[in-house]
Amino acid sequence: MKARRFASTGSVAGLTGFAVLLLFLLSSFSFTATEAYDALDPNGNITIKWDVMSWTPDGYVAVVTMYNFQQYRHIAAPGWTLGWTWAKKEVIWSMMGAQTTEQGDCSKFKGNIPHCCKKDPTVVDLLPGTPYNQQIANCCKGGVINSWAQDPANAASSFQVSVGGAGTSNKTVKLPKNFTLKAPGPGYTCGPAKIVKPTRFVSGDKRRITQALMTWNITCTYSQFLAQKTPTCCVSLSSFYNDTIVNCPTCTCGCQNNTAGSGSCVDPDSPYLASVVSTPDKSGSNAPLVQCTSHMCPIRVHWHVKLNYKDYWRVKITITNFNYRMNYTLWNLVVQHPNFDNITKLFSFNYKSLSPYGDLNDTAMLWGVKFYNDLLNQAGPLGNVQSELLFQKDQNTFTFDKGWAFPRRVYFNGDNCVLPPPDAYPYLPNASSRPAISLLMTILISLTLLLNFAQ
């Protein structure tokens, strides 16, 4: 669309094809760089709420809670890492439900030694199985936070922190700054802390309401462009009415034998496969070790238009994991297609309608059934999950022509998957039938003319 707009102006009329292509590429990159806004989840974010619960002689005790208000993007293992910079010379005396990764230099303290003396502490969640006297509610899940639509009961994570060297009233407390959130890698950008109305708490019997002494919020938004340099998944297409299988575009997530690092892959037929897969990642970056394919993506989503009935049509979805280093727990898939407003039956997946555009119901979130297929295993014979969807036709809009039966957008675990170009979609075999019809008409017309001439 952008290239078309450039070409329509008179100032570009004299440019060469190469210049127009260059302008298109530059415009595409400028668009990608602003992808922090998610069109399918426009209000999605992670909100960090910092509630001061009590004052101490040299500071305060606060409960910090991270709420994942993203519909389908969750924080997977090894979990979140939260950082900030103190405004003054604060220290952390103690923590419950989390810990800092470093203590820092606490040599000036005599007697009681703080938990952390760093100007810029980094905090991580505690692991499951932590002793109860070190826990608070919503803690100790290894930093894993589920998405809001998939599992709202586990879409938050909390810890308690006792801060010293800080103000002891609403007027003297200075808000921390420079918040950072890794989940577990980059991708999130956090805004400044803002003072809001104190949080209110309802007692268990719902007969009493208390409130925090002071509350401030931090909002963090996700950008796939910041999270990784290349895509992480792609989409392939096929249909019953065409023998062509449209694979993921070549080099979607990298190319083989690329020295930059994204071309490292494993041949599934290699006799050394087991030893290579079992070798730990020494870099600690949790980088994917993928099976060698033309697309080099860790995840491929295949959409197959399977059957056509009088009033219904059926689609088969297969998600394949090509990553030898990752089992995807609580995975989810988001698909946009206009016929989701008439979905009739779903087999072996959970379904939730997402309506990012109000009354327009064209987006669905799919995920596995617990204890059945909610775990997508690492690459190998068991590294796939699949389901079938049955749609009811709307005779006013339904067609197999011009790729209408294929999805408009596909997300896996919140990351946008690359679709093939529209001109590569499987097409209806109309073109092959037209010559036969034309030939038949030609013969009939010729016979009619001959008969008329003979008479």
Image (tube, rainbow, N blue to C red):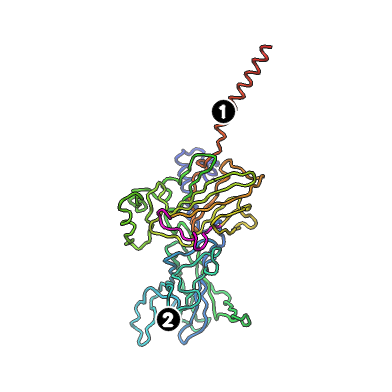
Q: Would residue 5 be counted in the magenta stretch? A: no
- The picture places residue 360, in percent across and down from the top left corner, at 63, 54
Q: Nearer the viewer, residue 298 or 53?
A: 298
Number of labels in the image equals 2
In depth, the one of 108 and 82 nearer the eye is 82
Question: Above or below — where is 187 with respect to 271?
Answer: below
Give the quarter of the image for residue 140.
Answer: bottom left
Residue located at (41% from left, 66% from top): 78
Residue 442 screen position, x and y as percent: 60, 22
* Mark 2 vs mark 1, CA separation in Å: 81 Å
Label 1 sits on a secondary structure element that is helix
Give the number of the disc on residue 94: 2
Left or right position of 381 against 207: left
375 in the magenta segment: yes
**For mark 1, what is the residue?**
435
Residue occupying the point 37% across, 83% down: 113
Q: Quadrant for residue 328, please give it.
A: bottom left
State which mark lies toward you, 2 or 1. 1
In the picture, which quadrant includes the N terminus? Answer: top right
Crowd rating for badge 1 (residues with CA inside 10 Å; few <14, some 14–19, many 20+): few
Q: Amino acid at mark 2?
A: Ser
Is residue 454 visible to us here?
A: yes
Looking at numbered disc 1 in the image, what kind of residue is underneath it?
Answer: Pro
Q: Work out whether mark 2 precedes mark 1 in sequence or the reverse, and give the earlier one.
A: 2
State whether residue 243 is above or below residue 92.
above
Badge 2: residue crowd in 10 Å (few <14, some 14–19, many ≥20): some
Quadrant (top left, top right, bottom left, bottom right) of the C terminus: top right
Q: Secondary structure at mark 2?
A: strand
Circles 2 and 1 in contact, beta carbons < 8 Å:
no
The magenta region covers 365-382
Q: Is residue 343 left or right of residue 319?
A: right
